[in-house]
Amino acid sequence: MVIILKNDPNENQLNNLLCLLEKKGISVQKTVGVSKTILGLVGDTGAIDIDALRALDIVEDVKRIQEPFRLANRKLHPDDTIIKVGNAAIGDGSLTLIAGPCAIESEEQICMIAKSVKASGAALLRGGAFKPRTSPYSFQGLQEEGIRLLIKAREVSGLPIVTEITDAEQLPLFEDVDIIQVGARNMQNYELLKRLGKIDKPILLKRGLSATYDELIMSAEYIMSGGNGKVILCERGIRTFESYTRNTLDIAAIPVLKKRTHLPVIADPSHATGKADLVAPVSAAAAAAGADGLIIEVHNDPPRALSDGAQSIRCEEFEELSRQLKTLVKCIR
């Protein structure tokens, strides 16, 4: 249930209302927006008299929320959530670029790519240290050493870093990571999500291979219910009958998620297509659909990449793509 207050509500009346709700066992989330103050009620609201609430001087309207999610719901939080990391901001109306290799391979590789993508306009550096792969024989990442090298790349480039966690027991290794990524395979790893809800660090949550919008949002809700509201949703393509591309980017997910939640929404054109030559046009489509950012795989030598070289673009290609996206965003926003 949501209570929308009138402008400048009387403090005494508001405190009396909060005390009344507390006595009924209802917890209240207060959100102060640009033009509205909203009280989100969490608990058994079935016995609450909506008409009695509407009759209060300080109340403009009362609405019941039908969706199963509360904290991520835009009805409770009408203003966009902006997540700031270093000098980067995700969700502020700009297009934030996150770029780097699928897998960290060496100090020379990750540092060189970090400096290159920063010069080309990237605001954050991505790099895989722990690599959950379909085949147990594929490169599994440098793991703890990979995180150390990623931190080194941050030192030389100044870019905040993003990398994927695959198990809650790895959390101590991620203390110096700026944004923790939860991959598609772990989107419904609820024990991991609960642990991530207890930390004060942004979480980049990727949509599962066949997850619905509600399932993705409810996974975000798991994190937020633990106290961590810094969640970034990522549309990375879903599995369909089409086999030409690695996955199928659900472009409608971007405006739908932005309509239903207040969380930033980014897109991953690399995993969505699996083909380097499709990354640029799909990036443009996602930007046009209103994405708050893009996470793009960039490698200095894709044919020799230890992971996902086919979908990685070269550093010079990222530079050109970044330039094109800046022009596009100016036109459409």
Image: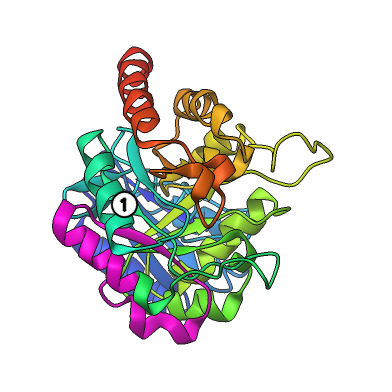
**Which residue matches tag 1?**
125
Q: Residue 314 location in percent, x, y?
A: 41, 36
Asked if 108 appears above or below 290 in the picture, the reply is: below
Residue 306, x across and y down, in percent = 52, 57
On-image quarter of the C terminus: top left
Q: Residue at x 69, y 46 (%)?
A: 238
Query: Which element type, helix, strand or loop, lies under badge 1?
Result: strand
Q: Is residue 120 left or right of residue 66?
A: left
- The part of the image, by quadrant, that contains residue 244 is top right
Magenta-drawn stretch contains 194: no
- The answer to which of 297 and 88 lies nearer the viewer is 297
Residue 117, image x and y in percent? 28, 40
The residue at the far right in this view is 241
Residue pictured at 57% horizontal, 28% vertical: 278
Q: Residue 242's quadrant in the figure?
A: top right
Prevailing secondary structure class for the magenta stretch in the rendered image: helix
Q: Is residue 42 left or right of residue 298?
A: right
Q: Where is residue 49 shown, x and y percent of the image?
A: 55, 62
In the depicted view, which residue is nearer to us: 73 or 58? 73
Q: Residue at x 47, y 23 (%)?
A: 288
Q: Is residue 226 toward the left or the right of residue 217 in the image?
A: left
Is the image coloured rainbow, by chain, by secondary structure, or in one colour? rainbow
Q: Please state the extent of the stretch shown in magenta in the rendering.
A: 147-176
Label 1: how many Cα within 10 Å (few below 14, some 14–19, many 20+): many
